[in-house]
Amino acid sequence: MKSPESLCLLFFLAACASPDMPSGSDRQQPPNIVIFLADDQGWGDLAFNGNESVATPHLDRMASEGARFEHFFVQPVCSPTRAEMLTGRYHPRSGVSATSSGMERLDLDETTMADVFSAAGYATGVFGKWHNGTQAPYHPNARGFDEFYGFASGHWGDYFGPPLEHNGVIVEGEGYVVDDFTTRAMAFMERNRETPFLVYLPYNIPHSPMQVPDEYWDRFADTPLAQHHREPEREDRDHTRAALAMTENIDWNVGRVLEKLGQLGISDDTIVLYFSDNGPNGARWNGGMKGWKGSVNEGGVRSALIMQWPGVIPAGTVVKDLAAAIDLLPTLVELAGINAAYGMPLDGVSVAPAVTGVPYAADERFIVNHWRGRTSIRSARHRLDTNGQLFDMVADPGQQNDVAGINPDALSALEEAKALWQADVLAEAEEEDRRPFTVGHPDFVITHLPARDAKAHGGIERSNRYPNDSFFSNWTSTADSITWNVQVMASGEFSSEIYYTCRKGDEGAQVELSFAGQRAVAAVPAVHDPPLRGMADDRTPRIESYVKDFATMDLGTITMAEGIGTLSLRAQEIPGEAVMDFKLLVLRRLD
């Protein structure tokens, strides 16, 4: 049995480059990197993993022409996995403790993948769902990415031409969002083809709402499925069909990127990798594994990972060693042959030798999965679940039989490793996230403060219990308010703009924005009363909020002094029945 000291090394080791490692140092410049990240896609949603109902030819080709990982692990939900990929560190260390309300933000002392590659001369861009902080310095443009196009929230309510963000500015999306993200990413590649680039494509599907173009849905509607969840009575068949239709759209977009790299003549100079952020978002076929999204069992945390680099990663490579999202940063750094200053000790290790065919001695290691007080731990042979049961994952991949009683040595080793991890990693996690929302960063003109990050007081109601992409309604009293606990990072004068809707007869309400005795006041200028939408495009009933097309109103300028306090929206006068429905406050630094 390993000592606690040696176990600790397994958690923190960041592997150094092997001297014989083929890398960017052998080329005129380091390789480009393209990272695809699916959202809520299960290991079993892909044809190369045995799904007989879906066609993923481009991903299948990547798997056959590059490396496929058999035992790759992420975390049970979105933002923790993204944080771990970006930092190479377990998410409780980085302040990520939830998926909304500011608790998805990545601590400011963390070095991100984009920071590392930007320092090495890379152009960096992210196109899709960020989900690790909205306001600078948590915003992607403040975390090393030159370009951001997408949304910072945990999910979005409309996938067809919705409002999106481009480097802080609200713009109208074009077509289906995943197609749009891909088009923007390809344009970025073309603009930066002469220099190395890092392109991060965190797609937002097959996360619900289950919206997908007819072209893909029609392939699955009313079509029998070849395989089902191990508890078939729990499966929503149309939800499964929609998820697989979305997977086929992802595959098409992966193919577009691969074709673009070929057209630009840089396929051989580009590392491309693909994985998902957690298990499937529902009960569907997943190789018989236990659990899905949100679970720390195998089915909730095992993801596909495929990696392609022609001429460097041998075709048909199958990696059987354990690997995890925390390994991607050190692995890409080693493959690229760049120098990296991380600032913090990494939990991940480079698995570059495993994909390039360079002989190396893989240390015994453990991968930890954690979410909301539940922790499980995986070795090459066993998983110790959150309830203390031990499963032989080779003989019993579905976690059916507890073998703790007949494997005392394995049980003891995993219990010791789990206790060590909890004592160390969870010691860095705060019990309650008290970080205020940041406003007025001196290096960034625009700050977005959405309803998601606000608290409603009085009779005001949130449009959905899931805060991401929600809005506030039922604002009927001058005693009601919407507030944010904010930290103004540098004093200044700011213009303020509200995204709102207003029914006929309610126009003219006087709205006040105030902070530390300073205020801006304006009247709701006009009726804008669009219907709720989204349901016409949903393939199955959603659990998230429906959306509206919000208009903008100028609230005027407000002077805010550096410091922490409450930023508040109130109504001074309400001539009609209500003030407005509120979606977003945008502040712009004027000085």
Image (cartoon, rainbow, N blue to C red):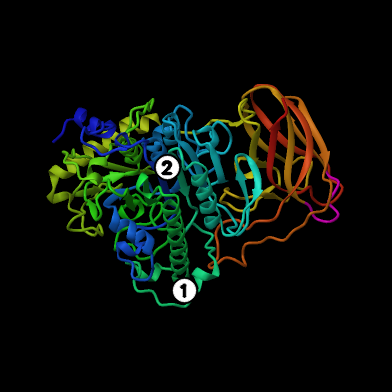
Which one is in front, 530 or 581?
530
Q: Which residues are magenta?
A: 502-509
Q: Is residue 131 visible?
A: no
Mark 1 and mark 2 in contact (Cβ < 8 Å)?
no
Q: Secondary structure at mark 1?
A: loop
Crowd class of label 1 (few under 14; some 14 to 19; many from 20; radius 10 Å) = some
Type of amino acid at the residue the image marks with label 1: Arg
Residue 539, magenta (yes or no): no
Please tell me which of labels 2 and 1 falls first in the chain: 2
Q: Which mark is residue 219?
A: 1
Residue at disc 2, secondary structure: helix
- Residue 460 marker: none
- Which numbered tag is attached to residue 80? 2
Of residue 237 and residue 362, the one placed in the foreground of this image is 362
Residue located 31% across and 34% down the image: 25
| Quarter location, residue 488 | top right
Is 20 situated left or right of 225 in this image?
A: left
Percent x, y of residue 480: 74, 41
